[in-house]
Every structure is written in structure tokens, then in C-alpha cells.
Amino acid sequence: MGAPHDTISRVSDSACVPSAASAVPTAVPTTTVPARHSALVRITHWITTLCFFALLVSGIEIVISHPRFYWGETGNDLTPTLFKLPIPASRSLVPTGYGYTLPDQNGWSRYLHFQSAWLLVLTGLLYVAFSLLNGHFRNNLLPGKVDLSWRAFSRSMADHLRFKRPSAAEAWSYNVLQRLSYLFVIFILFPFVIWTGLAMSPAFVSAFPATVNVLGGQQSARTLHFFVSLALVLFLLVHVVMIFLAGFWARMRAMITGRMITGRAAASKEGA
Amino acid sequence: MSNPLPRKFSRRTLITTGLAATAGVAGLGVAARLAQKYGLIPPDHSGIYGLGETLTYASQRLLTRHSLAREFSRSQISERPFPNEIEPPTDEFKRLQAGGFADWRLSISGLVARPASFSIDQLKSYPSRSQITMIQCEEGWSYIAEWIGVPLSQVLQAVDVLPRARYVVYFSIEPDTWESIDMADALHPQTFLTYGMNGSELPVGHGGPLRLRVPRQVGYKNVKFITHLTVTDSLKGFGKGLGSASAEAGYAWYAGI
């Protein structure tokens, strides 16, 4: 566990920390401890996870049918590329340098991609609407003024770079880097990946041509969609690594049941 | 702490949940009825991807019924349009090609007052229109070309489509190659029976002598070598009833995205 003053400053700015957590851990019955994550957060988190994997797998399959990227309005097998992925393709006419063609999976991939996108967007809207109403963003995700000071920020950064395990008290709240990355994913990456996805739809852009024109064209939208997806995958990797670092089962349990392991169990599990 | 249950499942919670669930189911029922009435249910609406497909088709149909596909300037026409792979031409196609497609016919049947058959020259006798639009393949590649032809709506007007018409099914000379579109797309001003491209005849690689251009949907709805159209009020009688050969091969019937 970190130095005592660490724990206090960490805890004092968070509205969702129960009083029991900042005190010396005692044998508190789990039923009286408030949920670490609300039911809405837990349910939308796992629906999002499911949709994200479906989108990722189907997205990879779709890219395999044409692993070439362009900038501007148009691009095809006869035009120069911005870059190519060094992988074989599922269509025989794509010049990949490989002597074989992978099986075509685009039918179900496109169906699954769009169905998962719908479920993800609807889940996301539900999450954002409720989180605005119940103060989840304000209380749990917006960094406090103390957190945004250079000192606090650089300390959090240094802790991360040293792969320091978070203290038990920290498990009740998000640190400043966590808050900023979650806000970035929710309000920048997800909206941008939806936008660049829709900007590839010939029917959607017929009604809203500006959505593709400001991106520089339909192929630019496709290339940007690819990069934003990569950024989301990068976030996922870091997210999973951090969960392992912080204690995989405790964090999984908190996101599934809402309950934290408290008292002596927590003390031993968190390695205090 | 003697009785923690009532807090979780109070009568109020039960009643509220019950009412919400009933309202939800009733709302879905009403929505499905309305969607059916206004033609917002695609033929491939059943199956595990039916919900997503229905949401896409219904929302795009509501948003884009009259919207026009983006048109480009002449300078944006692709210098290297990619003619996607075509099947080896059938003997029938080779015979027609040898005759300069003079004997190519487009027959129109189904829910029309005057079934008819048109040669390419007859189609050219209608005022010719052109559009500079993008064709994009579901794989991800694209090109922009000038497409020259006659709006399908004009030909449908000539054969006098009956009011109950809901879909136009179109067939290629290639075996097992057929698609269908709803009337919103069939009567759309940019849906062309295309016989020319970039100021010349439509090359065979791009679907010549006759291709249906549906610029608000991706490539596979833009069927090459069209020989037959039929107007119908139901897609049930065609193949497996999914509305197109692509849908039977596992691809979405509606391809606006």
C-alpha cells in the first residue's frame, strides 16, 4: 500500500468512495458496502465488450477482402495506395504478393458488423444518457481540480510507468490517467469510429454529404476508420494489462457482481 | 438486516418493471406493424442478423428516401476505373457481342400494364441522362465514373407500373445473378439503366451493354448484363424469397452501407 498521504488525497476527491474504505480495513460485511460499479455500468460494459469483439473480428474479415488503404475519394487495385497490409486477401484480384486466396467471409462479417454496431450504439446512448443524469460522468470520470494539477498528474504518470500496483483504497475510484483515457474513449474514439463508419455508407452520405466531405472523401473515411479501430484495440490491450496489474479477479468480480472484496481478504489480495 | 429482500423486490419495483415490460412488448408490436405498413422490413429480416439488417434498412429508408447520391466534378472521374472480375461470357453473351449487341433485349414483365421488350437502341431513344457518381464495392475499393443511360423510372413509366408494385427484380444474362430493389430506389432519379460510361459505350468489363446503376447501394446491387426486369408486390416467389442471389449467398439484401 502507498504512503498514507497518498491514500488520503486519492480518496478525498472521489465522491463514490465509501467511508469504510478510507479507514483501516475492518471486517465489514459485504452487503453494506455500496457497489463499486452500478448495474448500468456493469451491463453496458459487458454488452460493449461483446459488441467490440464482434466488430473487431468482422472488421478484420472485411479488411482481409481488400487490405489496401487509400486517401481521398477513390482507390482500387489499379491505383496507388497510401499503404498496404502485408497479408493475403480473400479476393483473387487483389495484388498481395501471396500465391493464394483466403476464403471469402464478407457476407456474415458485414451482417455481424452492422448488427453489433447497432447494439453498441444503442447501448452507448443508454449509458451516456443515464451517466449524464445520475452524475456518473461528473463524479467518477471527470478528473477533480486536484487531479489536474501538474504534480498530481506527473505522480500518477510516474506510478504507471513504474507499473506500481494500485493501493486497496485506489480500487474504489479511478485515477486521473484512467479518467482521462475513459473520457477519451467514450467521447472521442467511439463517436469518431461511428462517424467514419457511417461516412463509408453511400446511402447515409447521400442524406448527409458533409459527413464524408469534411473527412476528405470516402477512402479517407475508410482509412481513418481503420486507424480509430486500431486506437480502440490499443486501449483494450492497455485496459486488460492494467486489470491484470491491479488484480484480475478482484476487478473482474467488481465489474461482474458490483462488489469489491473488502476487509482482510482485500488486504491480502492487494498485497498490502 | 433481518429481512433484506423487500428492499430489492418491493411491490412498486415489481409493478413498474411489469408495466415497463408490457409497454415495451406492445411498443415493439406496434413498431413492427408500422414498419411492415410503410415497407421498412427487408426480405432477409429473419435469421440471427435480421434485427440489425431491419434497423439499417428502416433507418436508411426513412432518412434517404429522396436524397441524392453525391455527384462529382468531371475532374474527379477516376483515370483507372477497376473492372471487377466477371464470369467467362456465356455462349449466348458471345453471340450477342459478335452482333454488336444489336439483338440484346431488356424484357419487362410483372405488375405492369404493358409488358415490353427493349433493344439498347430503343433505350437510347429516350432522353439520355448522365451522372458522375462513385461505385464502391463492399470489399472497400471504389472509383468515380460518368454513367450514361436512361432513368429506370422513365422506362417503368413507359410500361405503366401498377400501384401495388413494391419491388423491381432484375436479372443478368449470367446464370443465378439477380437482385431486387424497392420502389424508392427503383423510382429514384439516379437509378439508371446504364449503357454508356465516360463518354463512350459501357465496356463489357463494367457491365456493358446494359447495367443497372443504383448509386446509393454498393457494387453488388449494380448488376451487370441486365436482360430482364420484373415488377412485383412480393419477393416470396423469387428463389428462396430473400430478394436476391446475394442474399441467398449470405450477403445483405439491402446494401446502402
Image (spheres, rainbow, N blue to C red):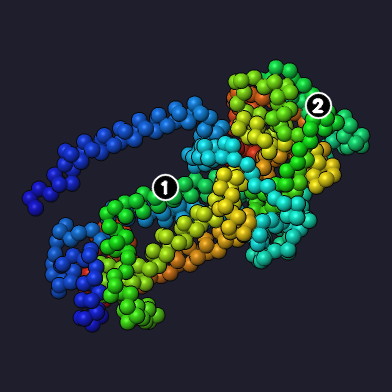
The residue that disc 2 covers is B118
Label 1 sits on a secondary structure element that is helix
Q: Chain of mark 2?
A: B
Rendered-image quadrant of the C terminus of chain A: bottom left
Question: Could you say where residue B27 lies in the image, as x and y percent from the top left?
Answer: 37, 32
Question: Could you say where residue B144 lies in the image, as x and y percent from the top left?
Answer: 72, 51
Q: Residue at x 87, y 29 (%)?
A: B103
Q: Nearer the viewer, residue A205 or B254?
A: A205
Q: Is residue A124 left or right of residue A230?
A: left
Q: Is residue A96 left or right of residue A176?
A: right
Few, some or many residues within 10 Å of mark 1 (<14, 14–19, 20+): few
Q: Residue at x 20, y 76 (%)?
A: A8
Rendered-image quadrant of the N terminus of chain A: bottom left
Q: Quadrant of residue A171?
A: bottom left
Q: Is residue A44 left or right of residue A9?
A: right
Question: Could you say where residue A147 lies in the image, as x and y percent from the top left?
Answer: 30, 74
Q: Is there any visible trace of residue B194 in the rendered image?
A: no
Instruction: Name the amino acid type tagged 2.
Output: Phe
Q: Is there any visible trace of residue A250 in the rendered image?
A: yes
Question: Could you say where residue A69 lies in the image, as x and y percent from the top left?
Answer: 65, 61
Q: Residue at x 52, y 54 (%)?
A: A195
Q: Nearer the viewer, residue A38 or A211?
A: A211
The residue that disc 1 covers is A122
